Amino acid sequence: MKPFGRKPIPALICVVLLLTPLATLGGVVPNTPLVDATTLHHKVMCGYQGWFRCPGDAADLGWVHWSRNAQRIAPETLTFEMWPDMHEYPTTERYLAPGFTYPDGTPADLFSSDNAATVLRHFAEMRQYGIDGAWLQRFVVGLPGAPVAQTYPSNWRVLQHVRAAAQQTGRAWAISYDIAAMPTDRIFQTLTTDWKKLVDDQIVADPRYLHEGGRPVVQIWGCYYHNPHNRMTAELGHQLVDFFKTNRRYAAFVVGGGDWDWRRNPDAVWQKLFRRFDAYAPWNIGNYTQDAAGAKHAATHYWAEDKLECAKAGMVWLPVVYPGFSWDNLQRLTPGSSNIPRRGGKFLWEQFHALAALHVDTVYVAMFDEVDEGTAIFKVTSTPPTQGHFVGYEGLPSDWYLRLVGEGGRRLKPGLPVPAEIPIQP
């Protein structure tokens, strides 16, 4: 089955912070070592959307990425698939979702990413469970001069929240640009202008910002062949790589991201582009096989060839793993029709097992907080509000996937065996 790819984003996008003191999370964060942010290697990091907004938060943009109607949230307006577990969030991080109640009748609430304490909470969870950090998704369409530029002040605050949270928790972080929904002729100028600002303002010089070979790491999602939502061309891709590789002041270690079947792209110019990246991350979400019993498994049969081809080109292969999938609400589908079941964590664990056989120590986990497409690994409730359709963690503890990713990373990074069966109990 073909992967679903990167979807077009609703008008809203990313985030980043106010330079205000962060709240503490008394006792949540254990005394774990700082992550070595000087190298991409030996890292298990998660994509971090940071795009959720609620009425009454600092952004004042309404229900962003929770509802297709910014002014109203209701079962028919939902754009997300999983309800976050809000038990540990204090009132200062909760935003009431009118009309939604848990099975016991308690009013339900949601969080905003434009809240420094909430971002810190998420990074504290990464530290607690041994996850190395986050790729902050930075949507080009929400940058100055782009179609959804009105979201930029909030996006900027979130970026600053992430910086501060990474510093406080000792995690690594890096920018992951996504060109979805951006006109081709405006991508280069908009993206590079933003990167120049991040360099000039010393943002990527942070000790917690991920580097490789002395260069800051930057990811560019959007290397999709003839994809109407990601208007990348091979020529534009070469132009972007030239910028990051030939401009000494703004030089970076460039990670491309896009088609999982990139090696089968018939265009010679595209093939040259793929091999100019310093690393490549094939987006594998939605790409699966089925066994004789009908159970779905992430497609991993092409991984060995991917790794070999990247090595031939002198690139790092950055595999993308995911725990399952569902986007019925987002796409207005019949409940359950798009679901790739998690199978109690086996769907994700099989991918860690396959990577161990390939001696891989660096992984991109999709995603930390992506409840829109049902790929989140952070704390999600299996007893969501009764109004609307939601997918939970099949009755497992809300931290089960944080534990699984932490355990997988603990074994992969030093080259320890990853058994076929999950070695820990819920």
Image (cartoon, rainbow, N blue to C red):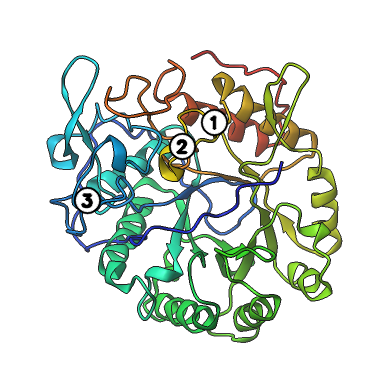
In depth, the one of 300 and 195 nearer the eye is 300
Check disc 2 and give the amino acid type: Asp
Q: Amino acid at mark 3?
A: Leu
x, y (%) of residue 121?
30, 40
Counting residues from the N terminus, which is met first, the one under dot 1 or under dot 3? Answer: 3
Classify mark 1: helix, strand or loop: loop
Q: Which residue is at a point 59% across and 86% down the rendered structure image?
A: 247
Disc number at residue 339?
1
Question: Could you classify mark 1 by the number of other residues whose Cα lies within 10 Å: few (under 14), some (14-19), or many (20 or more)?
Answer: some
Which image quarter: residue 60?
bottom left
Name the residue rendered at 36%, 59% in the picture.
163
Amino acid at dot 1: Asn
Count of marks placed on residues: 3
Task: Relative to 191, say whether 383 is above or below.
Answer: above
Answer few, some or many: residues within 10 Å of disc 3's Cα (few below 14, many 20 plus, some between 14 and 19). Answer: some
Task: Name the residue beneath numbered marker 3.
Answer: 22
Mark 2 or mark 3: name the one nearer the start of the chain: 3
Q: Position of residue 104 (x, y in %)?
A: 20, 14
Decide: marks 2, 1 in contact (CB < 8 A)?
A: yes
Q: Which residue is mark 2?
A: 328
What percent of the width, then of the height, locates residue 293? 73, 16
Q: In the visual, does 168 lie left or right of 245?
A: left
In this picture, is 412 found above or below 15?
above
Q: Which mark is residue 253?
A: none
Q: Residue at x 43, y 58 (%)?
A: 9
329 lies left or right of 229? left
Name which residue lies at 13% across and 51% down: 56
